[in-house]
Image (tube, grey):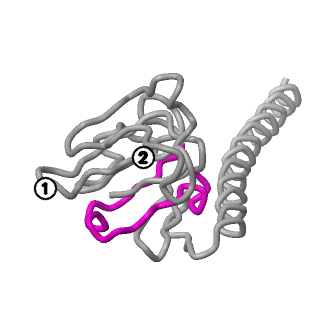
Amino acid sequence: MRRRQATFLTAVMAGLTLLSSAGVATAASASDSTQEEVDAILVEHPGGAQTGKDSITWSNGVVLELDTGEAADDACPQDSMCLWDDQNYTGRMVEIPGSLCGLGFIFNLKDYGFNDMASSWLSTTRGLSNKYGTVWWDYDALGGKLWQMLPGLKAPTLPAEFNDEASSVTC
């Protein structure tokens, strides 16, 4: 009887060890996958630096978050314009700080690995007339305007003709 109990306990412990190891391997694989994605973006889009486990910041202040994992109001910092690659403010997010508005910059989304990906947006800028973004069809603010991101407004979904079409932003 003792031998059966010992064998049973040994089998249970071995099973638990395998299960816990599988969980660790899965978590590590997800983490490795995110790091591989960050590394690939940095290679394809120079000038950025990894600033978090799943975020990249470029020298001009634009930030790309690979997975915000938060509600829109929490993920998009105050005084920013944010675009997400999925509806309802999910997936990758690119953040353009409102402090860069009025300086004549063109933010080419391709430079941040975000070309033709926007499916929702939110502007947390407030009140100042020059703190709104204009979203364009093509690189370098060409090809016509798609929409404007006015202070305090948002769009959880985009009309089909605008979805996954944004290539640049001016503000």
Quarter of the image for the C terminus: give it.
bottom left
Disc 2 residue crowd, few under 14, some 14–19, many 20+, Cα 10 Å? many
Taking the magenta stretch, the answer to whether it contains residue 87 is no
Q: Report the residue at 33% width, 51% height from top.
A: 133
Q: Indicate which disc, 1 or 2, sits on the residue closer to the N terminus.
A: 1
Q: Residue at x 72, y 59 (%)?
A: 36
Vertical arrangement, residue 102 with respect to residue 167, above or below: below
Quadrant in the rendering for residue 7:
top right
Would you name the residue on which mark 1 appears? 128
Q: Could you tell whether 25 is left or right of 93 in the image? A: right
Place residue 12 in its image quadrant.
top right
The residue shown at (26%, 66%) is 102
Question: Where's residue 1, x and y in %?
Answer: 85, 23
Q: Which of 127 and 171 is in front in this view?
A: 171
| 108 magenta-colored | yes
Label annotation for residue 114: none
- As rendered, which of 104 and 143 lies closer to the eye? 143
Which residue of the protein is positioned furthest toward the left in this rendering?
Answer: 127
> What's the amino acid at mark 1?
Leu
Q: Residue at x 71, y 65 (%)?
A: 44
Find disc 2 in the rendering and name its residue: 135
Q: What residue type is labelled 2?
A: Val
Identify which residue, 66 or 17, lies in the foreground: 66
Q: Position of residue 162 (x, y in %)?
A: 50, 31
Front-most of 165 and 99?
165
Q: How far apart are marks 1 and 2 (CA)?
A: 18 Å
Using the image, determine if residue 12 lies above or below residue 171.
above
Q: What x and y, as percent, mark residue 27?
A: 66, 47
| Residue interval drawn in magenta | 92-114
Q: In which quarter of the view is residue 17 placed? A: top right
Q: For mark 1, does the 10 Å Cα neighbourhood hold few (<14), some (14 to 19), or many (20 or more) residues? A: few
User: Is label 1 in a helix, a strand or a loop?
Assistant: loop
